[in-house]
Amino acid sequence: MAGTDNKYDAVIVGAGFSGLYMLHKLRKAGFSAIVLEKADQVGGTWHWNRYPGARCDIPSLQYSYQFDEDLQQDWSWGEKYSAQPEILDYLNHVADRFDLRKDIIFNTEVFSCDFNERTLVWTTETSTDTYKSKFCIMATGCLSVPNKPNLPGLEDFEGELLHTGSWPVEPVDFTNKKVAIIGTGSSSIQSIPVIAQEAKELYVFQRTANYSIPSNNGPMDQEEEKLVKSRYQEFRKENYLNGFGIAGLEEEALAVEATEDERRIKFEDRWKKEGLGFLGAYSDLMFDQDANKLAANFVRQKIMQLVDDQETAKLLSPEHCIGGKRLCVDTGYFETFNQPNVHLINLNKDPIKGIQSSSIGNETDTYEIDTLILATGFDAITGAITSIDVKGRNGISLKDQWRSGAKSYLGLGISNFPNLFTVTGPGSPSVLSNMVPSIEQHVNWITDCIAWMKDNNKSVIESTQLAEEEWMSQVNEIADQTVYRHVESWYNGSNIKEKSKDFLPYIGVPTYTDQITEVVNNDYQGFIFDKSN
Ligand code: N01
């Protein structure tokens, strides 16, 4: 199919890290493709999440594309963990460098994708036009649809209402403002220290305290950059062999077998330099609740030291398994609560009773505010896909099919949805890995599959229900062996009331990589071809 009359080999939804590389890769392989993007620019997550303090918490030398050696050699990151504007600059650079914009339609929201079993064509309806394609590729991101909680009276609020996941492009000025922020996940933990510097008063409404490790961010270490660049490809390959696909996280030793002194030294060392790598201090921290408690206690002690007021410190000390909810990485988060203009409100003891035109209140107090920030997270992993009306074989709706739990084979294909691929879909390492290499791995897999189909005269690919069920059982069996199972989180849909509580990410990049390679080596075992012919 040529890219004319809105007919393409592939329609790609989303122009973030996934969509940009998907377009580049398909074009290079000789296929026509178009990217449909709701925003007026590229960036995806890094376009929408421009709240103050937003930055990646995986070192930028790793949180970047590896598909083009010249690109990875030419680009230099300013800091160890880059802030959102620099990541967005990088994605703009990639879009320009590979001349991607000419095949991206901006300001276009995708409403529906419909598969015609007779013609084997996907029809994509958008806010601006209709597109036809053989393949439909969801490059919609794992954290794209903001979770907007149903708070009493929210609609009556007349001040500035913001969500960290859909932050305005124009900078927000907090000078002399009274600000309330609801939620204490990564977005909040990154933004609170920055907002607190400007705001007159900052009220933090906390339901669940969270663990956070200092980022110890700073300017890029030139020697480290030189070293990595001297062997970038090997470095990237080595990282795929680590459980989370991130360099230097893991050690073999068990926390439960170490002496108290050894543990203190190790945790202290990790606290001082590793951010997320804190959880890699010992190999049993995510598998053994007793080991996990040792790490959790260490962080709780740190919080008690960092926060002057011991009541506030206690309230900021989480009780769940560390890492069970996504570990946060911060710059001065706990210390911010020592500022006189920052106030912590315990929603567990005293929930929000009502929001009025210029205030938010619980049973005990009413807080006059100018700005209300929802830092309440996302309908993660599946939300962006199910927010589109996707219809497959026999008009089956994906939303209905996933109502009792999202099932996918390898996080790449879904039964009843022929020629539909998801990049970092449910059942793949995605959010429990370094997203960018995981995206590249999927884009490469999908492109190779489409090329293989062309070479082998196959017109339709679809995963079997059995393969999908066995795969999701494996995903959940692995999760059952970890502490993730003991914590309510967006990994298992707990943050969205109507969602099924299955665990969605695949834990373990190397095992995952082996299996998706094996599937290809076995002629795409678990998929069927040409069922419609
Ligand atoms: O969202 P979250 P996020 N009333 O879901 C609370 C990635 N990320 O945007 O825990 C009151 O983590 C909720 O409370 P509880 C990263 O993967 C990465 O912060 O459900 N509170 C929680 O405290 C991260 O994990 C970076 O009890 C309510 C908070 O809102 C993911 O994005 C930076 C509530 C939501 O926390 C999501 O992070 C930022 C209600 N009705 C984000 N509803 C990087 O560094 C929810 N909450 C790369």
Image (spheres, rainbow, N blue to C red):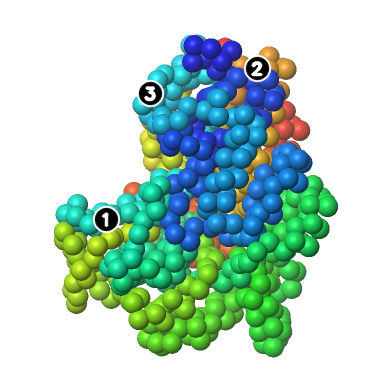
Q: Which label's residue is closer to the chain start, 3 or 1?
A: 3
The answer to whether marks 1 and 2 mark residues whose Cβ atoms lie closer than 8 Å is no
Q: Which residue is mark 2?
A: 458
Front in this rendered view, residue 422 or 275: 275
Q: Looking at the picture, does residue 428 appear above or below residue 362?
A: above
Residue 472, position as x, y percentages in the image: 55, 45
Frontmost of labels 3 and 2 is 3
Answer yes or no: is residue 411 visible. no
Residue type at mark 2 is Lys
Q: Is residue 134 left or right of residue 519?
A: left
> In the image shown, does 286 or 532 lie closer to the viewer?
286
Which quarter of the image is occupied by the N terminus?
top right
Q: Image point 76% across, 33% down: which residue?
A: 521
Labels 1 and 2: the sequence-earlier one: 1
180 or 439: which is nearer to us?
Answer: 180
Residue 167 on image: x %, y %: 39, 50
Residue type pointed to by label 1: Glu
**Mark 2 residue crowding within 10 angstroms, few (<14) / some (14–19) / many (20+):** some
Residue 428, percent from left and from top: 59, 45
Residue topped by disc 1: 160
Residue 492 rendering spot, x and y as whole percentages: 47, 54
Badge 3, how many Cα within 10 Å: few under 14, some, many 20+? Answer: few
Is 289 left, or right, of 149 in this rendering?
A: right
Residue at 55% from the left image edge and 57% from the top image edge? 83
Q: Is mark 3 within 8 Å of ligand 1?
A: no
